[in-house]
Image (spheres, helix red, strand yellow):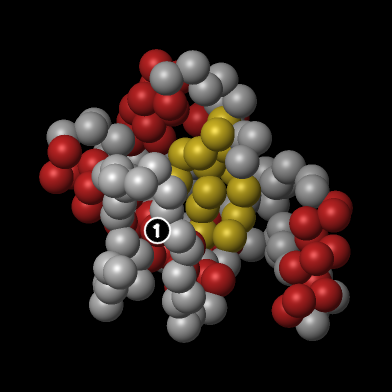
Amino acid sequence: MTKSKGGVLWVDESPSGNIKAGVCVATPPQVYMKIVDAVVEKGIEMNWGNVHPFSLEGIKAAADYLNFYGFTDMEVLVSRVQLPKHALPKENVELEKLLEKAMGKRKVLQQDRPVKHPECLTPDTTGLPLCPVTWLPKNYAVVIPGDR
């Protein structure tokens, strides 16, 4: 049995070919951010080239990185406060309903937040849809495959 006090344990390979999941005492947003942090740390450690500056050029470099591996449908996760009014996220009605039910709120995504840092991140400049999330801190963006 392997224990991890950091919340996320990176397993390069399993001798048996199986990986068993464990329990983490954290909220989903905390888990999501821990996963992003783990991928960033491992990417830097292994020189994967998957970590880029928080800028328009960094977003484009991250998209190029995913494109190299065959991903063509992508989106950019951004902090909710970075979402311009005109940049609506991809609609996922079923997911939004589940989140609303789980969180007990009427509306999970707020689409009327002003652009803060940097103003150059829009769907027009990045060429990708922006998806606002509440768990990502300011000055972070994560380019992910659209079919997640």
At a point 70% along the width and 46% down the height, the residue shown is: 89
At a point 69% along the width and 52% down the height, the residue shown is: 85
The one nearer the camera, 145 or 25, is 25
Report which quarter residue 36 is drawn in.
Answer: bottom left
- Residue 129 vertical placement versus 68 (above, below): below
Q: Position of residue 95 (x, y in %)?
A: 78, 56
Q: In which quadrant is the C terminus drawn?
A: top right
The one nearer the camera, 117 or 78, is 78
Looking at the image, residue 90 sits to the left or right of residue 116; the answer is: right
Looking at the image, residue 99 sits to the left or right of residue 117; the answer is: right
- Residue 134 vertical placement versus 119 (above, below): below
Q: In the rendered image, which residue does mark 1 sit on? A: 35
Q: Position of residue 76 (x, y in %)?
A: 53, 41
The one nearer the camera, 73 or 54, is 73
The one nearer the camera, 3 or 59, is 3
Q: Position of residue 53 (x, y in %)?
A: 27, 42
Q: In which quadrant is the N terminus drawn?
A: bottom left
Looking at the image, residue 112 sits to the left or right of residue 7; the answer is: right
Q: Is residue 27 visible?
A: yes
- Residue 21 vertical placement versus 141 (above, below): below
- Which amino acid type is marked by label 1? Ile
Label total for image: 1
At a point 30% along the width and 35% down the height, the residue shown is: 50
Mark 1, Cα crowd under 10 Å, few <14 / some 14-19 / many 20+, is: some
Report which quarter residue 17 is drawn in.
Answer: top left
Helix, strand or loop at label 1? It is helix
At a point 29% along the width and 46% down the height, the residue shown is: 15
Q: Residue furthest front?
A: 16
Report which quarter residue 113 is drawn in.
Answer: bottom right
Q: Is residue 123 visible?
A: no
